Image (cartoon, rainbow, N blue to C red):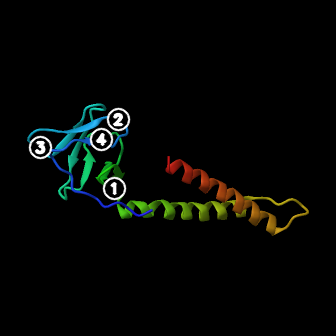
């Protein structure tokens, strides 16, 4: 699927709310901002004119969207996207080493059991973290 071309946001136009609550963004007079008639959120148009940013938010990071002509797409920074895989790899390595050193193998098994058990448990933990991070 090809990414859709981002369009410049017209300050005199009405758009659907990016919060997915069936609201509509209405321009606020004498500002470069929009207000939603349903969820009462305020969105500011960034300097480039292609991205809106949620002004009042409870999230630690501001949420931003790009308009494609039909829908809003989340505007992710390229730096933020790289942190999750790196974090998961580091956590996997640390948990694997920790489990490898602490697991006791049964009398009939050897080191292979410890390696396989540590690998499986580490993968399960990283999978749970990944699922939690992607909501």
> Quick check: 133 above or below 24?
below
Q: Please tell me which of labels 1 and 2 falls first in the chain.
A: 2
- Residue on which the image places disc 3: 31
Tell me how far mark 4 sits from mark 2, CA to CA.
7 Å
Q: Position of residue 23 (x, y in %)?
A: 31, 35
- Residue on which the image places disc 4: 16
Q: Position of residue 76 (x, y in %)?
A: 36, 57
Q: Nearer the viewer, mark 1 or mark 2?
A: 2
* SS state under label 1: loop
Q: Nearer the viewer, mark 2 or mark 3?
A: 2
- Residue on which the image places disc 2: 22
Tell me how far mark 1 sits from mark 2, CA to CA.
20 Å
Q: Estimate how packed mark 4 is, as few (under 14), some (14 to 19) or many (20 or more) residues with alpha carbons within 10 Å.
A: some
Residue at horizontal 35 percent and vertical 60 percent from the top:
4
Q: Estimate how packed mark 3 is, as few (under 14), some (14 to 19) or many (20 or more) residues with alpha carbons within 10 Å.
A: few
Image quadrant in which you'd find residue 20: top left
Q: Nearer the viewer, mark 3 or mark 4?
A: 4
Q: Please tell me which of labels 2 and 3 falls first in the chain.
A: 2
Q: Please tell me which of labels 3 and 1 falls first in the chain.
A: 3
Image quadrant in which you'd find residue 111: bottom right
Tell me how far mark 1 sits from mark 4, CA to CA.
16 Å
Residue at horizontal 30 percent and vertical 40 percent from the top:
17
Total marks in image: 4
* SS state under label 2: loop
Q: Position of residue 122 (x, y in %)?
A: 66, 59
- Residue on which the image places disc 1: 75
Residue at horizontal 50 percent and vertical 50 percent from the top:
133
Tell me how far mark 3 sits from mark 1, CA to CA.
22 Å
Q: Position of residue 88 (x, y in %)?
A: 54, 60
């Amino acid at each position: 699927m090809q990414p859709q071309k981002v369009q410049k946001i017209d300050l005199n136009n009405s758009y659907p709310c990016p919060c997915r609550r069936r609201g509509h963004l209405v321009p606020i007079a004498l500002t470069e901002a929009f207000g939603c008639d349903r969820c009462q959120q305020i969105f500011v148009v960034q300097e480039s004119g292609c991205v809106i940013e949620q002004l009042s938010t409870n999230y630690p990071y501001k949420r931003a969207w790009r308009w494609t002509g039909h829908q809003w797409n989340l505007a992710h920074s390229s730096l933020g996207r790289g942190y999750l895989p790196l974090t998961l790899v580091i956590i996997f390595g640390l948990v694997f080493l920790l489990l490898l050193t602490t697991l006791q193998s049964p009398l009939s098994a050897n080191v292979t059991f410890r390696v396989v058990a540590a690998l499986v448990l580490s993968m399960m933990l990283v999978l749970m973290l990944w699922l939690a991070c992607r909501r």
